[in-house]
Image: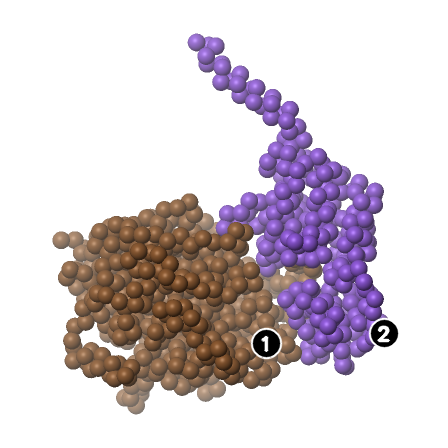
Amino acid sequence: MSLIRSAPRLLAAAFVFLAVLTAPLAQALELRKPGVLRVAVYNEFPPFSDREDGGIDVDLAKALAAKLGLKLDLAWAEADEKVEDDLRNYVWKGHYMGNEIADLMLHMPVDPVFNERVKQVKLLAPYYAENLMVARDLKRIPKLENLEPFFQNHDIGVEVGGGSDTFLMALYAGRMRDRIRHFKNHSDAVAALRKGEVSAVMGPRTELEGLLGADKNGYAVSAIEMTGPVMTFWQPGVAVKADKPKLIEAVEKAMAEMVASGEVAAIFAKNHARYNPPRAEGAPH
Amino acid sequence: MQRKTLSMLVAAALAGVSMAAAAGPVTDEMILNDAKSTGDVLTFGMGTNGQRYSTLSKINTGNVKKLVPAWAFQFGGEKQRGQESQPVIHDGKIFVTASYSRMYAVDAKTGKELWQYDHRLPEGIMPCCDVVNRGAALYDNLVIFGTLDAQLVALDQNTGKVVWKEKIDEFSAGYSYTAAPLVVKGLVITGVSGGEFGIVGRLDARDAKTGKIVWTRPVVEGHMGYLNGKENGITGETNASWPGDTWKTGGSSTWLGATYDAKTNLVYVGTGNPAPWNSHTRPGDNLYSCSTVAINPDTGKIVWHYQNTPNDGWDYDGVNEFVTFDMKGADGKTVRAGGKADRNGFFFVNDAESGKLLNAFPFVDKVTWASKIDLESGRPVYDDANRPGNPGADKQGKTVFSAPSFLGGKNQQQIAYSPDTGLFYVPANEWGMDIWNEPISYKKGAAFLGAGFNIKPLFEDYIGALRAFDPKTGKKVWEVKNNAPLWGGAMTTKGGLVFYGTPEGHLKALDAKSGKELWSFQTGSGVVAPPVSWEQDGEQYIAVVSGWGGAVPLWGGDVAKRVNYLNQGGALWVFKLAN
C-alpha cells in the first residue's frame, strides 16, 4: 500500500532529476522553455533586425544565446506607439492577441529614469551608445556645422513621429517646417537621400550608417550642434522581466564580456556601422 | 428609376402602409425603408441615418416590466474581450459579429446556431485598436463585415461561405477595421481604422455584390480621390491648413463608419484626430480631421464639411455618428438636421444639406478646452491655457488638466433619437485627464519628446450618464447616472422607451419622457453594444450583445481601476414579453 502510494512520488522525483540533468542552465536562468532563449527584436528595423537580412540585433541575439549555451528562438516584435507598450507586449505581459512573450528584448533604452516608469522590467546590459546625427549628400552640403542649410534651400528627411521629427518641427517656433520631409521609416528616408530627393536625413547614427551600407562614398554621417529639448544620446541594451534575478545576472555578465572582447564591435563592423561602446556612467539627463 | 422607387416608398410610408418583413434578397429599397419596416433590422443604426428608433410599441411603458429572456446564445471560444456588435436580422436569421473577427448566424426564433465563420488572422498581427467588431451589413444574399487585418468579407447568408473578400488596406502598415459597413445604392461603404502614424483616413465604396472598388475619397487635404479607376480631384486644397508635408501622414482615421440620409443623398462620416499628436507642430485647422464630412455617394466627392475641433491637441476624434432628423425651427419651418455628440464634449446640430451650424451645447458637465462653440462663426472659443504644452519647445512642461478625457464625452457608444419626444438620448461620460510633457520617452529605436497622461473620474459616484437632450434648446431633460463609464449604445421605441446597457451587466429600459427606470436585466457580463428591436410572429423582441471590454480597460488609467472587477463574456441575449 505504502509502496504504491509512494510510487508516483518516486516517479516525479526521477523526472525532476532528469530535467535538472538535461537543462541545468535553463532551470537556473528562469527561462520560459528549458534550453531555449526567446529573444524579441523589432520587425522591419534595418540594420538591426530584418526578417530576411538579419542585422546587428539578430547577430547579437545569436551570439548571446551561443554564449549562454542555449538555442535561440527569435520573436519578431511589431512596434507599438512607445517602448512602454513594446515592453508590455513582449516582455512582461503579452499582447491581447495572445502572443508568446520573450525571455528578453533587445534595443531597449538603458535609462534609470525611464525604468522607473516600467518597473515590471529591468533595463540592463547596454551594448552600445547611440547618437542623433545627420547623414548628408557631400555634393550638396560639403560642410555642415549647424542646421543653417535647412533654413534655406535644403530639405531634410526624418522618420515620422521619431525624435528628429518632434525636435525639428518645433525648433525656432517651427521655422524649419517647410524643409522637413517625413518618411515612414529611416530606410525610406535614406533611399530618398540616395535618390537626391533630400539633401540630408536626421536620425540615429547607427541606423543612418547601416542603411547607407558598405559604400558611403559621397555621403557623410556627422554630429551637429543641437540646442533645445532633444535627447542626442542614449544607450540601447536588454530588457528582462524584473522578477528573474538569475537571468538578469547571466545576461549582464555575458554582455559585458562580449563588449569587452570586441565581439559586439565586430558585429557592428559586419553591418557597416561604426561602434561606440557604452559609457559606464550612462546617458546624461 | 431610383428616384421613382424612392418617392413611391415615401408615399407608401406616408399613407401609413405597414411594412412587414420581406424575405429573399436584401434590396436598396428595403435598406432605405429599414427604419420603418418592423420585421427586420437590415442596417447598423436601425436605418441608414442611425436614429436607432423602433416604430414598434407592443413593448411599452405599461408592460415592459414583463420582459423576460426568450433565449441566449454564447459565442464561446477561448478569447473574449469587448463585444461591441449590433446584430442585423433578416428572413428569420440573426447575424452577429464577435471579437477577433468572428461571425455567427443564429435562428431568430430558437437561438440555434446556423453557421459560424472564424476569419483566419495572420500570425503575429497586433491590431492597434482592440479586437472588437461593431457589426455587419446586409445586401442581396450577402452578409458583409470587416476584419482586424483590414479585409472586407462577404458571406452567403444561408451557408456562411465566402462569396468575395477584398483587402481594405495593409494591416502591416497599421490599418485595421472594426466598424459596421454601410450599404447605399448597391455600394458597400467603409472607412479605415488604424494607428496614428502613417495612415490617412478615407471612405471607400465598393460594388456590394462583387467587392470591386468604385470610388475612394481621402478625408485629409491634398490627397487624390478616385472614381472607377480614374482621378477624381484632390480633397480640399494642398497645404491650405497643414504646414510642410504633414498632410501626407495626416491621420484622421474614419474608424466608426458612416451614416446616410436619403433626403439629402449624402453619406456622413466622422473623422479622427490629426497626426502627429503634438498640435504645436501643425499650426492650422488640419482639415478635415475631427470633422463631419458629407460625401455624395454618386460622385465620391465632398459636398460639405464641418470641423468640430480645429487643430486638435487633445485626441478628440470627431468620428462620432452624424444622425439626421427633422427639426422644427423657430419660424415653424422644418429643417433636415443632423445631431452629433462629439468626443470633445459638445453636441453639434448642423443643417444636413449645407453643414451650417444650427446649434452647439455641452452635453457633459465639464469642458475645459473651449468655453463655447460660437454659433456665428461655427468655431470653438478656445481656452489657450488649457492646451497641452509643446514638448519640443518646453522641456519641463506643465501638467494640464483637460476635460473631457481623450476617451471623450462620448466614444463609440451610439446615440438614439426619438421623433415622438424630439429628444436625443446620449450615453455620456464625465472624466478628465492630466497631460504632461515627457521629455524622456522612447519608441522603436529612438528617443523622442512624448507626453504622458492619466484619465481620472470627475465625480466619486459616477462616470457614465444617460442623458436626454432637446437639440433645439440644448436643454438636458433628464439624466440617469451610472457608476462605470457607459460604452454601449442606446435605442428608443414608439413604445415610449429607451434601452441601453451598462458595463455592470444590465440591460435597462427607461421611460423616454422622464428617464424613470422601468426594467432591468443582468446579462452576466458588461454590455458595450447597442440593443435592437424587431417583430416576428406578431411579437416584439429586443436583442443585445453582452461581453465586457473595449477601450476603457485598455486605456482607462485611474478609471480602469474602477472597472477591473468586471468579467469578460460573449453572448447574444434576446427578450420578449412573458405570456
Query: Which residue is disc 1 drawn over?
Result: B247
Q: Colour of chain B?
A: brown
Toward the bottom, the furthest residue is B331
Which chain does the residue under circle 1 lie in?
B
Three-letter code for the amino acid on which mark 1 is drawn: Trp
Which chain does the residue under circle 2 lie in?
A
Q: Secondary structure at mark 2?
A: loop
Q: Quadrant of the N terminus of chain A?
A: top left
* Residue A284 image point, x, y percent: 78, 56
Question: Residue at point 53% right, 18% down?
Answer: A11
In the image, residue A149 above or below residue B104: below
Question: Residue at point 39% right, 54% down?
Answer: B102
Question: Residue at point 53% right, 16% down?
Answer: A10
In the image, residue B335 above or below residue A158: below
Please indicate, yes or no, whether residue B226 appears anywhere in the rendered image.
Answer: yes
1 vs 2, front mark = 2
Query: Which residue is disc 2 drawn over?
Result: A142
Q: Colour of chain A?
A: purple
Foreground residue, B411 or A2?
A2
